[in-house]
């Protein structure tokens, strides 16, 4: 049986193997999911909610093991990995109750009701940067809604997903949750199979392929497709708070986060002070392995992504950007904390998602110029404004699904992207209902 090997991003040493679900295996996996879904859907919402909570309780015994695997497979420091695990393990009782409440039948008067029925089989395709949390955010509402789930995790973090699914399946009925390990070909076969919905978090390019493939079967889609999040720093901003956010957001998870700050537009009247303080704070960050106590920036997940970040830095260098900290050349597997200014619209750092620990700064004279550049992107996941009076007005002009004023975007309400950052959304009652089929009964 073919296997997939997981590699340590620090030294590319093998960490372990999992069995691959080849494209020819997918129809049988989906058939088992269809068969299991019938009896799972026949249970009441409350019964499914209780079973899912019991399954998640099994994860408490392996929290440390999951955190260690996250650190080893994608390089995240153990503290951050532990937070990711804790958020997944400790909150299901609350979230499943919220999901069940959102999916309860609603009265539409004395003679009609609106029901939220299962769709059938949901394919969850999850990324490597938050290998547990992102899979969980899509898997949990799908299961409680009465669907069966086939999880196709990233090939960069197969061991985390394998342990996660294996542990939940100690309680879940057989076939309700299955895993299909493999590369893009496995994912394509799953999308093309007889499933009913695809819930995906990943790249824009992959999302477009999924959408095209799903069209022939009119399969339901919920997709979060990355971002190129802007930060506008107005002259009225609290500079110290803006600096703190700019650096922390750009470097969080080594910049490998869909809502990382990727482009900063700062009023030229405060730009010198802002840049000086950004550099001073960025110098305090250290790149290193997950188990180094003084390291807070981990490795880039693989050589391909490392080269992607370098290509953007090299492009910025050639086109006249100024490197205030760092350079445009780094050896594998790290990108050291980097601060670049004089970014222009023709640079890749401004046009494309970076996914690396880079603070990219531009100056503006007129606020309208900053708004125009912030919105001149195919992406529209998050945006942040730091400023005093007038910040709310600027926020209203942002073409993004989540906008933060003097704080990060997201965290309250559904996780939603605008433009090409999203199709559908998840989280809150409205998001949970996207994993269900609305049915109106008239009496």
Image: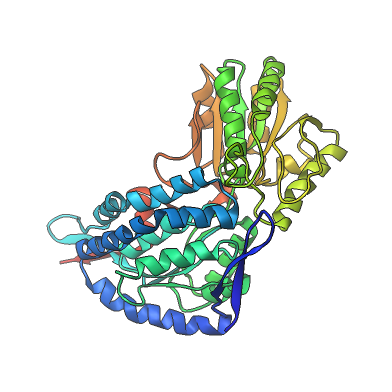
- Using residue 437 as the reference point, say whether residue 75 is left or right of it: right
Location of residue 390 in the rendering, given as x and y in whole percent from the top left corner: 53, 19
Q: Is 346 located above or below residue 235 in the figure?
A: below
* Residue found farthest to the left: 110
Color encoding of the figure: rainbow
Which residue is at a point 22% across and 70% down the rendered structure image?
43
Location of residue 6 in the rendering, given as x and y in whole percent from the top left corner: 60, 65
- Using residue 216 as the reference point, say whether residue 184 is left or right of it: right
Taking depth in this image into account, of 392 and 404 the one nearest to the observer is 404
Which residue is at a point 43% across and 53% down the rendered structure image?
64
Residue 188 shows in this picture: yes
Residue 437 shows in this picture: no
- Using residue 48 as the reference point, say whether residue 287 is left or right of it: right
Location of residue 416 in the rendering, given as x and y in whole percent from the top left corner: 47, 47
Which residue is at a point 31% across and 51% down the rendered structure image?
95
Count every numbered label the image shows and give the total.
Answer: 0
- Residue 3 image-quadrant placement: bottom right
- Using residue 16 as the reference point, say whether residue 286 is left or right of it: right
Q: Is 70 located above or below residue 236 in the figure?
A: below
Location of residue 344 in the rendering, given as x and y in whole percent from the top left corner: 77, 34
Quarter of the figure that contains the N terminus: bottom right
- Residue 351 image-quadrant placement: top right
Q: Is 154 located above or below residue 371 in the figure?
A: below
Which residue is at a point 49% across and 39% down the rendered structure image?
402
Taking depth in this image into account, of 15 and 331 the one nearest to the observer is 15
- Residue 31 image-quadrant placement: bottom left
Quarter of the figure that contains the C terminus: bottom left
Taking depth in this image into account, of 295 and 281 the one nearest to the observer is 295
């Amino acid at each position: 049986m073919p296997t997939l090997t997981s590699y340590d991003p620090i030294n590319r040493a093998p960490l372990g193997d999992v069995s691959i679900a080849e494209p020819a295996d997918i129809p049988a996996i989906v058939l088992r999911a269809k068969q299991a879904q019938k009896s799972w859907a026949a249970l009441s919402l409350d019964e499914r909610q209780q079973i899912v909570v019991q399954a998640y309780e099994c994860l408490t015994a392996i929290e440390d093991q999951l955190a260690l695997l996250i650190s080893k497979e994608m390089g995240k420091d153990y503290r951050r990995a532990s937070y990711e695990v804790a958020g997944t393990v400790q909150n299901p009782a609350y979230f499943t109750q919220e999901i069940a409440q959102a999916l309860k039948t609603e009265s539409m008067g004395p003679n009609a009701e609106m029901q939220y029925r299962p769709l059938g089989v949901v394919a969850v395709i999850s990324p490597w940067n938050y290998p547990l949390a992102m899979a969980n955010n899509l898997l949990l509402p799908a299961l409680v809604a009465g669907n069966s789930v086939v999880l196709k995790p990233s090939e960069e973090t197969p061991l985390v997903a394998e342990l996660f699914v294996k542990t939940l399946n100690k309680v879940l009925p057989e076939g309700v949750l299955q895993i299909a390990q493999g590369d893009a070909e496995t994912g394509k076969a799953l999308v093309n199979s007889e499933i009913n919905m695809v819930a995906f978090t990943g790249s824009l390019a992959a999302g477009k392929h999924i959408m095209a493939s799903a069209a022939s079967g009119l399969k339901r889609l919920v997709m979060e497709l990355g971002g190129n999040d802007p930060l506008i720093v107005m002259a009225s901003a609290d500079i110290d708070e803006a600096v703190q956010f700019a650096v922390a957001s750009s470097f969080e998870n080594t910049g490998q986060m869909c809502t990382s700050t990727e482009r900063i537009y700062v009023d030229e009247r405060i730009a010198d002070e802002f840049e000086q303080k950004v550099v001073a704070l960025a110098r305090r960050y250290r790149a290193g392995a997950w188990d180094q106590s003084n390291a807070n920036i981990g490795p880039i997940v693989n050589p391909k992504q490392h080269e992607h970040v370098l290509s953007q830095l090299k492009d910025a260098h050639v086109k006249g950007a100024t490197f205030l900290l760092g350079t445009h050349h780094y050896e594998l597997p790290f990108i050291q904390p980097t601060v670049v200014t004089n970014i222009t619209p023709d640079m890749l750092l401004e046009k494309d998602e970076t996914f690396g620990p880079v603070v990219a700064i531009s100056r503006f004279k007129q606020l309208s110029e900053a708004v125009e550049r912030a919105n001149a992107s195919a992406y529209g996941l998050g945006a942040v404004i730091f400023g005093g009076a007038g910040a709310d007005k600027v926020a209203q002009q942002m073409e993004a699904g989540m906008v933060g004023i003097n704080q990060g975007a997201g965290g309250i309400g559904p996780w939603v992207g605008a433009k090409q950052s999203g199709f559908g959304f998840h989280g809150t009652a409205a998001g949970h209902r996207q994993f269900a089929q609305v049915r109106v009964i008239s009496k």
